[in-house]
């Protein structure tokens, strides 16, 4: 892959419907556009985690326009993985209406056990047809068998997220994210790069993640969010009505 990889879609952002995020949707879009984004996915925390969005947020978000300031908006969520069975905190009724769904492990919602349990958790999440992206799986608190999980993710057309926010908030992510990206490259598994922005100024910030992908010469064809067209076409291929 050539240097200076260009990513025009931010697949993972939070708005101030959670108090621990600071941007309104319009501010996120505005600053995302300044950072070069042509598409932004609003993916607020689903209800099981403290300070999440209320379930009504995920109902009324469908009234939002497709474009704000010329930037394409996709509406989804960051669902919480609840247990080893891979259950998440959003019902099928809501999941199937979303443009994109990320599923992530967050400490308050999931009890950490052994590596084998985390592997089983991800394998079960991968079976969920409404989950598109495995969120920040590089978190060293929840190690898993990369070969087994990434192989399964590839087979079921899931994207592994390389999360730029992990580099600053999840200690030890740097090495882990690199190992995950290397495994995705080896097996040909699709990825997305997300900012996981909790402030408007971070929408479209992929610095550390992009740098690492460049260092390992990650194949651009496996990055699903380099352009809006590519990301939409991926979502359509897995049954999303976008
Ligand atoms: Zn998260
Ligand atoms: Zn997030």
Image (spheres, rainbow, N blue to C red):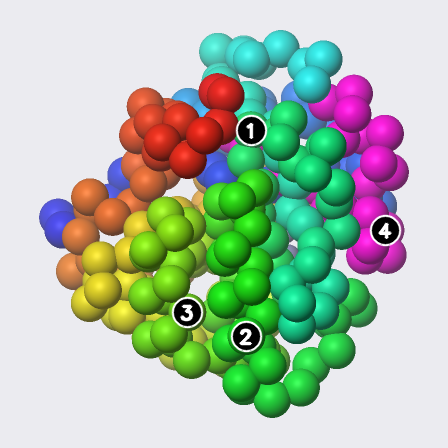
Q: Of the residues under marks 4 and 1, which one precedes in the sequence?
A: 4
Distance between the alpha carbons at the discs numbered 2 and 4: 28 Å
Q: Which residue is mark 3?
A: 149
Q: Is residue 110 above or below residue 190?
A: below
Residue name at image x 78 percent, y 37 percent: 16
The residue segment tinted magenta is 40-61
What is the secondary structure assignment of the residue under circle 4? loop
Distance between the alpha carbons at the discs numbered 3 and 2: 8 Å
Mark 2 in CB contact with mark 4 (< 8 angstroms): no
Q: Is residue 103 magenta?
A: no
Residue name at image x 14 percent, y 51 percent: 1
76 or 212: nearer the eye? 76
Q: Is residue 238 above or below residue 167?
A: above
Q: Is residue 201 visible?
A: no
Q: Is residue 58 magenta?
A: yes
Looking at the rendered structure, which numbered label has been put on residue 99? 1
| Residue density around tag 4, few if under 14, some if 14–19, many if 20 or more, within 10 Å | some
In this rendering, position of residue 162 left or right of residue 96: left
């Amino acid at each position: 892959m050539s240097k200076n990889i260009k990513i025009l879609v931010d697949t993972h952002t939070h708005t101030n419907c959670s108090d621990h995020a600071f941007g309104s949707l319009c501010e996120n879009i505005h600053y995302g556009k300044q950072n070069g984004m042509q598409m932004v996915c609003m993916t607020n925390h689903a209800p099981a985690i403290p300070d999440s969005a209320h379930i009504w947020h995920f109902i009324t978000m469908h009234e939002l326009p497709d474009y704000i300031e010329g930037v394409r908006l996709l509406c989804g969520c960051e669902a919480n993985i609840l247990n080893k069975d891979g259950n998440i905190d959003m019902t099928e009724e809501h999941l199937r209406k979303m443009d994109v769904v990320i599923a992530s492990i967050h400490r308050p919602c999931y009890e950490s056990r052994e590596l084998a349990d985390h592997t089983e958790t991800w394998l079960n999440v991968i079976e969920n047809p409404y989950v598109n992206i495995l969120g920040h799986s590089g978190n060293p608190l929840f190690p898993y068998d990369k070969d087994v999980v990434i192989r399964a993710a590839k087979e079921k057309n899931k994207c592994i997220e390389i999360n730029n926010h992990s580099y600053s908030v999840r200690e030890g992510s740097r090495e882990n994210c690199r190992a995950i990206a290397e495994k995705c490259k080896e097996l040909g598994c699709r990825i997305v790069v997300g900012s996981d922005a909790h402030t408007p100024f971070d929408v479209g910030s992929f610095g550390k993640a992009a740098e690492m992908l460049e260092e390992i010469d990650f194949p651009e064809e496996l990055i699903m969010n380099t352009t809006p067209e590519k990301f939409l076409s991926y979502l359509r291929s897995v049954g999303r009505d976008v």
